[in-house]
Image (tube, rainbow, N blue to C red):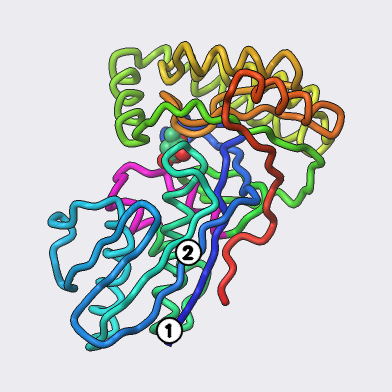
Amino acid sequence: MKSTASAPGKIILFGEHFVVYGVSAVLCAINKRITVSATKIQGNIISIKSNIGDLITTPNKPIIEINSPLKPFYFIANKMIEKYNQNTGIEILIQSEIPLGVGLGSSSASCVAGAAAISRLFAKTSKKEILDLAIEAEKTIFQNTSGADCTVCTFGGIMEYDRKNGFSKINLEPNFHLVIANSKIEHSTEIIVSNVKQFKEKNENTFSNLCKEESNLINNVLILLKNNDLTGLGKNMIKNQEYLEAIGVSNEKLRSMIELAQKLSFGAKITGAGGGGCIIALTNESNVEKVIESFKEKNYECFSAKIDFRGLDTF
Ligand code: MEV
């Protein structure tokens, strides 16, 4: 018996980091996907194969003993074998179009597609159950996740998310293109989130003011999105980038990439945790190619992306 699922990557348009402290964020799924297939096999084995390596081991191990980036898949497989009390092994195959570890939701999309493919080997799980399982799995590698990334990878489209109220889908299909450029600086979301926590603890007033500013910005952005006002949205990206600079998640390379993008696009900023990873530039048909060219001239890896409206797909 085989079950396959795919989930899109994501970008955070506005609100990363502040979302951890209760402010809303605006995210969208992008048309780059991870596909996971899971098969029940004979034997006491969980076998996970991916282009970043393999993990082949037995079920029933405490999760703390699993020292691999593929840990969330092990967690899900083990949990399902235990929950349904079945004497089966599971083989998992992962294929990704999403560059890994650069803030484009590869880990969340993996957890969502993994939770769907593996759980549906055992029962007809709902999207909500899959999302809960995916967030639980992501927590094995990133304990403080706000859950925003897994949510948008599950439902697709564009959405507002806050920790208390969860997500609300923004039922709009704005006509922008995003240029995503990779700094090629590796980063750990967990470490950067913990650095921001330290910054907050040392600068409570500044941080609380920044949260208020970010919250106002998000309210404006929600109106600008409805009006498809790319000029206004771009200006808010630039402002949001200033707040990210203030909490220390930017660096020289990211700043120079953003400066380059801002010359030709409506606006640009870090997307995701920062410290490395990717920046996004807001464009439309009039300037998307020019922005891509300017990055390619400087030898940056970059591509354009559109919003994915499918979200999780199961086959
Ligand atoms: C990481 O993609 C986004 C952060 O806001 C962390 C989170 O929301 O879990 C930095």
Judge by depth and name the residue closer to the eye, 94 or 268. 94
User: Amino acid type of disc 1?
Assistant: Ala
Judge by depth and name the residue closer to the eye, 78 or 227. 78
User: What is the secondary structure assignment of the residue under circle 1?
Assistant: loop
Residue 184 is situated, as x and y percent measured from the top left of the image, at 46, 29
On the image, which quarter does residue 247 sit in?
top left
Find out if the beta carbon at label 2 lies less than 8 Å from the nearest ligand 1 atom: no
Name the front one of labels 2 and 1: 2
Q: Is residue 123 magenta?
A: no
Residue 30 is situated, as x and y percent measured from the top left of the image, at 63, 48
User: Amino acid type of disc 2?
Assistant: Ala
Q: Is residue 138 magenta?
A: yes
Name the residue rendered at 65%, 25% in the picture.
296
- Can you say which quadrant of the picture contains the C terminus? bottom right
Q: Earlier in the sequence, mark 2 or mark 1?
A: 2
Specify the label residue 153 is tagged with: none
In the image, which residues are magenta?
135-154
Residue 61 is situated, as x and y percent measured from the top left of the image, at 14, 67
Q: Residues within 10 Å of mark 2 (few under 14, many from 20)?
A: many
Residue 189 is situated, as x and y percent measured from the top left of the image, at 37, 35
Name the residue rendered at 47%, 11% in the picture.
252
Q: Is residue 272 above or below residue 239?
A: below
Name the residue rendered at 85%, 34% in the picture.
285
On the image, which quarter does residue 273 sit in?
top left
Judge by depth and name the residue closer to the eye, 236 or 21. 236
Specify the label residue 123 is tagged with: 1
Q: Is residue 101 above or below residue 230?
A: below
Label 2 – label 1 distance at C-alpha = 15 Å
